[in-house]
Amino acid sequence: MTLIPHRPIGRTGLSVPELGFGAASLGNLYHPVPDADARAAIDAALDAGLGYVDTAPHYGRGLSERRVGDALRGRGDTVISTKVGRLMDPDPSIIDDRERDGFRSPMPFRMRYDYSYDGILRSHEHSLQRLGLGKVDLLYIHDIGRYTHGDAADGYWQQLTSGGGLKALEKLRDEGAIAGFGVGVNEIQVCLDVMQEARLDAILLAGRYTLLEQDALDALFPVCMAAGTSIVIGGPYNSGILATGTRRGGTIHYDYGPAPEDVLIHVRGIESVADRHGVRLPAAALAFVLAHPLVASVIPGIGSADRVAQTVDLYGEAIPAAFWSELRSEGLLRLDAPVPAPETAA
Ligand SMILES: NC(=O)c1ccc[n+]([C@@H]2O[C@H](COP(=O)([O-])OP(=O)(O)OC[C@H]3O[C@@H](n4cnc5c(N)ncnc54)[C@H](OP(=O)(O)O)[C@@H]3O)[C@@H](O)[C@H]2O)c1
């Protein structure tokens, strides 16, 4: 069995396995996942040592939290994060599993954003009820920023700052109700903005530090290093393309939509180098992000027990140093991005 080392999260005293479980899939992201498959996926993940699970109220409007909580109850050895910023209001008109916000879940709730003091405390309480757990370890402020809210972002920023949202999170941390908090977003600037206002334990950064893009090295990572804020890598495959590659039929996904041409060209370049060195693309995607010392864990989206086994196998792949050198010399990887240390002979 592959042993998965643990890494610390900020100053929380918590440590998490460097390979974790992204549970957006268990909210029926894009396609339904039967209850039994969802349960088998989490059980397999925990058995394999992926004892860090990330969920959110948004993922299937509560469905992912329910499934995660049912599987984790009584397992004290796991770390769980969920998110704040979206409240679920009952809506009896929802009775089928048509796709809503990308999720095929029939959970009868309508989503409402609320990053205020009361909204954050209520969201935390609601999550505990849905999870059926006495505690969550980490809370991420979910999707605050322009990537999600566009012109409405300023109003939500006010809720978080002058409206007391950050105060609520600090209170929960000070009282020990949570071990730590941070933000969970797909963009860099808002992380820097929130870090001006509060001490963050971790940032769940989705898609913005991957084998495909490394802009986070410029402004964000140095600030995190100075502040002692860990990075958790969400969306390590940029929501699909770094797992599937470019060669299979059908839509190739990048950031929740069809991959644009410049991204396809970049990934084709990486694939050619990977072919020359006998490296699997998703294995490189996982190994690359884990080479950065700020990264505490990488949490690919996993929706089945088979995918757990496949992911652990990818994680365990030995990647030759020449692969990383060639990516750099071909201009496919930034020169200042750390790469895994070469394997040393025993
Ligand atoms: N704002 C935020 O806080 C935020 C945003 C995004 C993500 N996240 C977190 O990060 C986690 C992962 O992100 P994500 O699920 O959006 O994206 P991801 O991990 O980059 O990609 C998931 C996609 O890759 C496919 N995939 C995974 N492993 C594969 C493999 N071995 N071979 C082929 N395809 C594979 C999955 O396909 P199948 O569907 O077929 O399994 C799924 O469509 C989420 O679950 C969530 O916990 C957080």
Image (spheres, grey):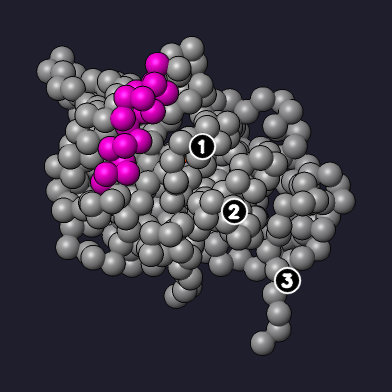
Which residue lies under the disc numbered 3? 342
The 10 Å Cα crowd at callout 3, few under 14, some 14 to 19, many 20 or more, is few
Say the numbered circle drawn on residue 196.
Answer: 1
Secondary structure character of the magenta stretch overall? helix
Picture layout, residue 173 above or below residue 346 = above
Say the numbered circle drawn on residue 207.
Answer: none
Q: Which residue does the image show at 57% across and 56% down from the upper left? A: 294
Pick whichever of labels 1 and 2 is earlier in the sequence: 1
Residue nearer the viewer, 37 or 345: 345
Residue 327 is situated, as x and y percent measured from the top left of the image, at 80, 51
Which residue lies under the disc numbered 2? 225
**1 vs 2, front mark:** 1
Quadrant of the image occupied by residue 11? bottom left
Q: Quadrant of the C terminus?
A: bottom right
Which secondary structure, mark 3? Answer: loop
Q: Which residues are magenta?
A: 155-172
- Does the beta carbon of the residue at mark 3 sit less than 8 Å from ligand 1? no
